[in-house]
Image: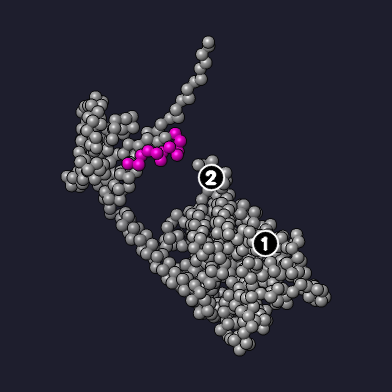
Amino acid sequence: MFRLKNLLIGKPLHNSLLVHEKLTKIKALAVYSSDALSSVAYATEEILWVLAPLGAFALSFSLPIAGIILLLLASLIMSYRKTISAYPSGGGAYIVAKDNLGQIPGLVAGSSLVLDYILTVAVSIAAGVAAITSAFPSLLPHTVALCLFFVLVLMIVNLRGIKEAATIFTLPTYIFIFSLLALIAIGIYKHALGLPIPSAPINPVLGSAPQSYITLWILAKAFSSGCTALTGVEAISNGVPNFKEPRSRNAAKTLIAMGIIIVFLFGGATFLAQILHVTPNTNETVISQIARLLTGKGWFYYLLQASTAAILILAANTSYNDFPLVFSLIAKDGFVPRQYAARGDKLVFSNGIVTLSILSAVLLVVFHGDTHNLIPLYAIGVFLSFTLSQIGMVVHWFKSREMGWRTNIMVNGFGATLSALVLVILGTTKFIHGAWIVIVLIPLIVMTLLKIHRHYVDIAKRLRVDDDHTFEHPEHIKVIVPVATFTRVVANTIEYALSISNDVTAVHIVLDDEKAERLKARWDKFYPDNMLLMICSPYRSMLGPLLSYLDEVEKSTSHHELIMVLIPEFITHKWWQYFLHNQSGFVLKSVLFFNKSFVIASVPYHLSEPRKKENTTVAK
């Protein structure tokens, strides 16, 4: 088992190596920008899905809508630069909202981020698989299986450590950036020189509605769909602690670089889609259609498709870096199980990585790995966290009154206003398409987190030792040993029991009279002075009569006495063989653990490896 773990994940890292797991700007851009960069691959397509059914004239609005989205992007980039400088410890929207707006807004922001990261993994992998099936349609029936395979790969890679994951994912990210930039350059070059470009085939999706049908509501829907291009913008502010020093400055520079790249990629892809009259297709992505029209199905087309699939799948890696970190901060505050605050063997938050993988896999199975089914759930949580983070920063600057606080309030206030406006548009336009699920889920998650926190607070009060507390030592220990047969395992347990108490009772539940008689005979030979209690079980139940006996013992025991139940168990040489035995002991321990105030312990007896028989030859 440990060999397999070391093979997949690698050997544990010493705590002192944590500083060496920090990321350079080059690697951090690949790790934390992959989500935002990958959105370029489907954001244009989501805009076109809304506009195409209304006809060619409606498609002309795609570029202005993309321009407004990029203006919003610039606002968010400036806002999050301020967040990075003010909160170099990371945590993003959760920490900002909690510190400046209070516990409940902080939990709302944290819940929004958690949902966003789960959906990011599901959407990114579904979109990446869609790019693969666009190039290889024969793989369409295996969409869900491919999605689950990539979830497993990402989980294993991230469990190997931040730095190792970054090294693996850097090259595909930069191949995507440069190949898509090259495609955009080819398209603009051919368009500027008037070179012949094949026309996109007529698509049944393209409608012919009158221009009067193109209302502000339709444009708002298209805008809200395209806002998926902004998902992942907050990732860098959440992951500041994972940057090399000076971490705030490096994170801010990486954030600006990401914004500039998105402007060129998203703006360029939308421009090419408009001039080539490309419309969305269920069997082929918009990026695939643009590349096929401009370059044909040569090596460059397959390179672009492969890199697009890679960046879409790797976009999920942003969540694998941020979800565990945010969850660890929430865990430190006592709102989720504290195990999420602990680092694993490779100095990453392993529990968060595994949890994210399981939840994302469930989503992919439920929604059949279809991007369009998942997108409506996607951006609500993102913009809710954007809004709370920016409002929190306005409050932060107002309280601190640092140099330039008025300018900072204007920047973050503008970002908060735009984010809130987009949030309202998203909630309105996508409500019936699935956004209601997220709107309902966030309050439920917050209520759950509060309940967990109340539990932790209550337990802490109950377990606290006051300065004037006095401890009571048990005056007597009564040991009870359930036995089925007389073996070395039982004898080992009895010997241990006799070493800690002179009041030892072995209890045998009689299911077979002959077996009970043989046990009694053996017992009297080795332990004639120690009581063996035989309890008949006419209905062949082992657990019921034993629990009834323990109830009677508990009633007759004084407050100053301690009852201890010792369960004999033997440990096999091979780990898998253990599960073929000891089921009765496991059931008994489980029942007693949750129902009795006894000391319950297993006394293990390790079986050594059986000796191999020597081969002998017989001379004839």
- Identified by mark 1, the residue type is Ala
As drawn, the label of residue 135 is 1
Within 10 Å of disc 2 (Cα), the crowding (few <14, some 14-19, many 20+) is few
Reply above or below: 124 against 521. Answer: below
Image side of residue 188 versus residue 255, left or right: right
Question: Depth check: 417 or 476 in front?
Answer: 417
Question: Depth check: 409 or 443 in front?
Answer: 443
Magenta part, dominant SS? helix
**Which residue lies most toward the bottom here?**
212
- Label 2 residue SS: helix
Instruction: Identify residue for label 2.
Output: 5
Q: What residue do we see at 57% from left, 44% from top?
A: 7
The image quarter in which residue 409 lies: bottom right
User: Which x, y percent locates residue 434?
Assistant: 49, 72
* Structure colour scheme: one colour
Question: Depth check: 474 or 577 in front?
Answer: 577
Q: Which residues are magenta?
A: 573-584
The image quarter in which residue 167 lies: bottom right
Is 560 inside the magenta-drawn segment?
A: no
Whether tag 1 and tag 2 are in contact, CB under 8 A, the answer is no
Q: What residue do we see at 44% from left, 34% from top?
A: 573
- Identified by mark 2, the residue type is Lys
Q: Nearer the viewer, mark 1 or mark 2?
A: 1
Is 575 inside the magenta-drawn segment?
A: yes
Q: What residue do we see at 51% from left, 65% from top?
A: 367
- Label 1 residue SS: helix
Reply above or below: 346 against 242. Answer: above
Residue 147 visible? The answer is: no
Q: What residue do we see at 34% from left, 58% from top?
A: 459
